[in-house]
Image: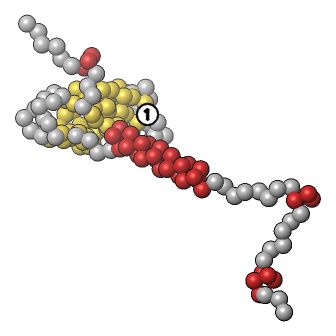
Amino acid sequence: MTDASDTDATPARPESRYGKPLRGPNRMAIAALTVLVVAIGIVVATVAYQRWGSGDVKGELASYRLIDDRTVEVTVSVTRADPSQPVVCILRGRSKDGSETGRRELLVPPATESTVQVTALVKTSRPPVIGDVYGCGTDVPGYLVEEPRG
């Protein structure tokens, strides 16, 4: 009588005919690769959140008004955590097909209130159908900052 465990065993393949059996993937290599992928994912998520996440400044479109076939007036409501700091907002005009046809940077000077509304004209290369706010931030370029005169 044969043992049940003997019949369930897979017969060994002749090494001379099939070569050495392939080893499965190294568990340490799989673990290291998994840790590396997770670490890269965390770094990418952190950088993306810092760059595009909710920041100290929020700019929302309050209104827009079409002035003529080359100009749109955009009013933006800017809310900031520290109103004593200047902010830059990028405003744009868009045409009927949705493409951006005009853009301008707008300096929002320091204020006493945390939320202010500012209005600016955006010149466009084609007739605009809408004005909008691309975004606002605290990284104000040097050429926008007003130099004190005296």
In depth, the one of 30 and 103 nearer the eye is 30
Q: Name the residue furthest right.
A: 17
Identify the image quadrant of residue 147. Answer: top left
* Secondary structure state at the residue bearing disc 1: strand
Mark 1 — residue? Answer: 100
Name which residue lies at 28% across and 35% down: 136
Q: Is residue 63 in view?
A: no
Residue 69 horizontal/vertical position (percent): 38, 30
Determine the residue positioned at 72% across, 57% down.
23
Q: Is residue 57 left or right of residue 7?
A: left
Residue 18 placement (x, y as % from top left): 88, 58
Residue at x 26%, y 18% (from the top left corner) = 142
Q: Position of residue 109 (x, y in %)?
A: 16, 27
In the visual, does 114 lie left or right of 18?
Answer: left
* Picture quarter with the N terminus: bottom right
| Residue at the outermost bottom position | 1
The C terminus appears in which quarter of the rendering? top left
Q: Quadrant of residue 149?
A: top left
The residue located at (92%, 59%) in the rendering is 17
Q: Is residue 99 left or right of residue 135?
A: right
For badge 1, the amino acid type reads Glu
Residue 122, placed above or below residue 17: above
> Which sits in the foreground, 21 or 68?
21
Residue 86 in view (yes/no): yes
Q: Residue furthest top?
A: 150
The crowding category of the residue bearing disc 1, from other C-alpha atoms within 10 Å (few below 14, some 14 to 19, many at least 20), is: some
User: What colouring does the structure picture have?
Assistant: secondary structure
Q: Position of residue 73 (x, y in %)?
A: 27, 33
Q: Quadrant of residue 86?
A: top left
